[in-house]
Image: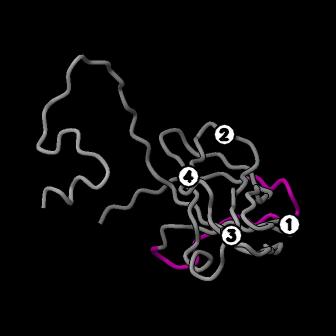
Amino acid sequence: MCHTTVTIKWKKIHQDAVIPSYVHEGDAGFDFTSIEDVVLTPYERKIVKTGLKVEIPLGYEMQIRPRSGISLKTPVLIANAPGTIDSGYRGELGIIVLNNSSGEYKIKKGERIAQGVIKEVIPVIHIEVDELSETVRGEGGFGSTEKNN
């Protein structure tokens, strides 16, 4: 089996920042940790700071995804999941979280709040045309596949 590796460069901009790493061999995602205590009021959306900057190679992106344990056990969602960090971005990595409940929720400093996954980005050539090819589905939209079965 062929494995390609990609080097990701991390810069700590806060003393409590944690450089991500894989917990288990074969894991797709690596965890991000909050550098601050954050209180989320009901249905509030905030950016949680990681204290990290990142350099992702050209041709790749980092997707920010929820951690399954947080999704199962708490009302916290990653608001734009999956979020995309482009290779050209050099600002602080922040995780956009949403408290999806009617009660207050606290994220503690040092808590693992999200995970990152590196994905290859395939360049696309965009062209405008007058017509598109025909398919069986055609213009069938949301839920249209159920109608064909």
103 with respect to 129 (left or right) = right
Which residue bears the numbered disc 4?
62
Q: Which mark is residue 24?
A: none
User: Which quadrant of the structure image shows residue 129?
Assistant: top left
Check the image and name the residue furthest to the bottom: 73
Which residue does the image show at 72% across and 72% down from the upper left?
102
Q: Secondary structure at mark 3?
A: strand
Instruction: Say which of marks 2 and 3 sits in front.
Output: 3
> Along the polypeptide, which appears first: circle 4 or circle 1?
1
| Image quadrant in which the N terminus is located | bottom left
Question: Depth check: 78 or 65 in front?
Answer: 78
Which residue bears the numbered disc 1?
36
Figure check: 136 above or below 22:
above
Q: Residues within 10 Å of mark 1 (few under 14, many from 20)?
A: some
**Identity, as a three-letter code, of the amino acid under mark 4:** Met
Q: Please provide the residue range marked out in magenta.
A: 11-26
- For the residues labelled 3 and 1, the Cα–Cα distance comes to 11 Å
Which residue does the image show at 17% across and 57% down from the upper left?
147
Which residue does the image show at 69% across and 56% down from the upper left?
96
* Residue 119 drawn at (x, y percent): 46, 52
Which residue bears the numbered disc 2?
89
**Identity, as a three-letter code, of the amino acid under mark 3:** Ile
- For the residues labelled 2 and 3, the Cα–Cα distance comes to 21 Å
Q: Is residue 62 magenta?
A: no
Which residue does the image show at 62% across and 76% down from the upper left?
70
